[in-house]
Image (cartoon, grey):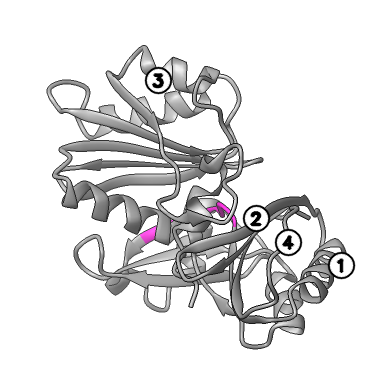
Amino acid sequence: MATGEIKSEASSLLLAWSGNHLQWLQCRNLTVLRCDTLPVNDAEGLGKALAELKSGFPAIQSVQFASNLPYFSLAPARVSAGMEEALQALHLGTDEADSLPFYTEAFGEEAALIERDIAGYQKQVEAFWPQAKRVSIALVFLETVILETRKHDKPGCIAVHIGHERALMSLFANGQLLWSMTTDDIAGDGILYHVVNAMKRHELEDGLDMEVWFSGQLDEEGELVQRFGRFFERVMVKKPSVEWAEEPQAAQHWNALANLLPCE
């Protein structure tokens, strides 16, 4: 667990589990008090980790939890209503995991982002915090990016968040979300390959002022950033716009989870 003494005052807890790693963040309004990432690869291990958090933070007043960089489908709500399982099977293949729909109007007409659930996750969290709220870290990430591109009038943007096992990739142009997907092909040139192919399909190879925003488990001077720098003039690593009780060494690791702030 992350170090640092924090007074036992009311605060909130954000959780994101990938099925192999649990990322948590304790916050009060827009201030991050503590954060950490734990190796947790099954429901039993998750229960033990949550029990430690419960005993360590007795004054938690609200909890939000999300699947960390899940596989998902994105479709207009008018198309997906009542067809969530079929759409998930069409896009991701058949799987015994449940589908979880989340809805937004940030991209124009109402859309549904349908996630593939992690078995046992919700049951474990609600055993410790029955009031916990399920949210979509993928949807909030995409909403945050599109709002920022519109606010600052960015013609084109590639936003990528890297996790331990997967990466969430997205492509925006002229205030619209054009493409997004989760991939486990994060070694080598996998991410660059997916992004370039998406740009070609949308005929964006030439003439559009494009920025690349990275966050997650990567270094500012790392190999992935350098590779994209050979093809794009502006490549940057985004860090959370929050207050830190003690800023971690690599704040960009927490960007997607910190998008859920304010916690209350």
Quadrant including the N terminus: bottom right
Closer-to-camera residue (196/141)? 141
Q: Position of residue 149 (x, y in %)?
A: 22, 47
Q: Is residue 90 above or below residue 235?
A: below
**Mark 1 to mark 4: distance in Å?**
22 Å
Q: Quadrant of residue 30?
A: bottom left
1 and 2 marks in contact (CB < 8 Å):
no
Tell me the kind of residue under disc 1.
Lys
**Nearer the N terminus, badge 2 or badge 4?**
4
Q: Position of residue 217 (x, y in %)?
A: 59, 37
10 Å crowding of disc 1: few (<14), some (14-19), many (20+)? few
Residue marked by disc 4? 5
**Mark 2 to mark 4: distance in Å?**
12 Å
Residue marked by disc 1? 48
Tell me the kind of residue under disc 4.
Glu
Residue marked by disc 3? 228
Tell me the kind of residue under disc 3.
Phe
The stretch of residues the image draws in magenta is 68-74
Closer-to-camera residue (216/108)? 216
Q: Is disc 1 placed on a helix, strand or loop?
A: helix
Q: Which mark is residue 234?
A: none
